Structure formats: C-alpha cells, structure tokens
Amino acid sequence: MLKRSLHLTLLITTLLLTHLCSHAQKPAATYTPPETWSQDYAPFRIAGNLYYVGSYELACYLITTPKGHILINTGMPGSAPMIRKHVEALGFKFSDIKILLTNQAHADHVGAMAAIKKITGAKMMINEKDAPVLADGGRSDYALGGNPAFEYTPVKANRLLHDKDTVTLGGMQVIVLHHPGHTKGSSSFLVTVNDTLHTYKVLIANMPSVLEETNLAGMPAYPDVAKDYAYTFDAMKKLEFDLWFAAHAGQFDLHKKRKPGDAYNPAAFIDRPGYDSILSDLQKAYLKKLGSAGH
C-alpha cells in the first residue's frame, strides 16, 4: 500500500507539473517537453473497433465504423504524421476519419487537430465551453491564456457539444460527459464496443487534475472553477464501465497493463480500483489546494 501511495503521489505531482507545461505549440525556450509526449508507440487494438493511435504518453483513440472513423485527441503539434502512420498501420484509411473529438482544449491533446482536420476534412466537435478556446488557439484559456508558450493552431468547431449529447457514426454512439474544471469544457466519453466474445462499456476519461495556475478561490474568467471541480469529482465517482482509459497513458497505467507486442487482451484494462484510487488522490490534491485558497 505504501509503494502504491508513493507511486500515486509521484504521478499526481508529475501530472500537475506536466499539464502546466504540456500545452505549447512553440514551447518556451526554457522548457523542453518530455520525449514521451512525442515518442512513437506502436498502435494496437484495444477492444472491438477501438484502437490506440497516440504517442507513448499522449493517448489518442480511433473508433472505426463502416461509414468512417472517429478520432479522439491528437497529441502535440506535429503529431499528425505519426497518427496517420498509426491509422494506416492498423489497416484503415486516414482520409476516412469523419469526426474529431477531444477530452480538453489544451495543446497536448489538440495540438495537431488543425492539421488533421485540414487533411481529412473531418468535422470538429467539442463542448461549447471549450469551443472559444479552440477557436483562438488557446489564447483565452482561463488559466494558461495569454502565454504564447501554450498556444496552438486555432480550429473552428463544426458542432458544439453539451453534457449527455450523443455523437453517432456508422452505428456507433459516443456519449459525451461534461466534466469541467481542468478546462471549462473538459469532457469524458462513453462508448460500447463489441468483439466476437464480449461487449465492453468503455470510458475515455478526462481526469480532473488541477493546474498550478488555477486559483480555486475563483479566476477572473472562471469564477465557478472550484464548484465545477466539485461537481466533476462527484459525477466521475458514479460512472459505470468495464474498461477505462484517459488522455494521458500514465494516468491509466498503460505501460504496466500492456507491453509492446502483447496479444489482443481487452481484459488488461479492467481496473476499477485503479480508477477509484487516482480519482480519490486527485480529489485530495484539489481539496488541499481549495483549503489553501481560503475555502
């Protein structure tokens, strides 16, 4: 238990720091993003028609259908060629991507969105509260806005999403869950996939870490940030699923659960205790910061 606790403490500290620095199209001269954010990682089939096509650390997901595909997240700026290579290595056409989604409008998750949208012509769909940030390339982000280090190529949304909305394509239904705090429009996604033996309810979660810049007493552009975080923690605790993933590979222990070359094994990602544990520790970090903010 002590080892697990130390691991989670280190993970949370790393997430708080790396999220602060991970959103740059042109990283600050004094900062070099970890190589793992752009490091190539062999794509693989997760479960049914759900695939991992991201980098070693920044998770991107492909949902395939007979009518085209859905891509969730794009990683850092410059990641488009890598994602394209991954999609094609799995036997799919990059040009068949029809819908783009994201967990949050920070550059480590939407950095290559503009490039992929331009190449594929896919429709960008994002929570209405993150749409303005996406449209100005991160400049109006409530915590990171105004710092050129955290900007990226702007993308205009084709559809504004809301809590409990459903995105449909080729018989697939992706349920959008608004989990605000980390960004105003942070979202998680629920989707059901099947293989020949099983049906899996899959959660792709936006884990609610708190940025160093976030003042939980209230931000000028986000006075209810603490209230939204409280809502998100409560809502995420109540979710039911079979498999869970997140926007960062380290958040759901991808590299402990699966090694390169491992055979297809959806069961490796059945981990409710891991989900509950990291959510609990993130909430403790939030409450500690909330207390220091005078609440």
Image (cartoon, rainbow, N blue to C red):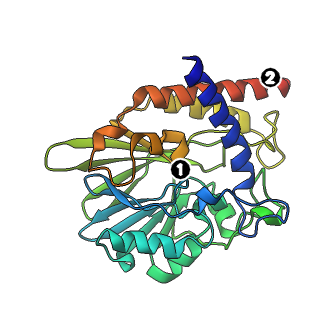
Q: Nearer the viewer, residue 3 or 93?
A: 3
Furthest-left residue in this view: 196
Residue 112 found in image quarter: bottom right
Q: Is residue 295 visible?
A: no
Q: Residues within 10 Å of mark 1 (few under 14, many from 20)?
A: many
From the viewer's perspective, is residue 1 above or below residue 42? Answer: above
Left or right side of 82 for 111? right
Sequence-wise first label, 2 or 1: 1
Which numbered disc, 2 or 1, marks the residue closer to the eye?
Answer: 1
Left or right side of 224 for 59? left
Left or right side of 286 for 215? right
| Residue depicted at 51% across the width and 60% down the height | 55
Label 1 belongs to which residue?
247
Q: Quadrant of the N terminus?
A: top right
Residue 265, x across and y down, in percent: 27, 45
From the viewer's perspective, is residue 294 above or below residue 98? Answer: above
Left or right side of 29 for 175? left
Secondary structure under badge 1? loop
Residue 234 found in image quarter: top right
Secondary structure under badge 2? helix
| Residue depicted at 63% across the width and 54% down the height | 129
From the viewer's perspective, is residue 7 above or below residue 91? Answer: above
Mark 2 vs 1: CB contact within 8 A: no
Q: Amino acid at mark 1?
A: Ala
Residue 29 found in image quarter: bottom right
Q: Nearer the viewer, residue 47 or 214?
A: 47
Q: Quadrant of the C terminus?
A: top right
Furthest-top residue in this view: 1
Q: Amino acid at mark 2?
A: Gly
Label 2 belongs to which residue?
291
Q: Nearer the viewer, residue 260 or 127?
A: 260
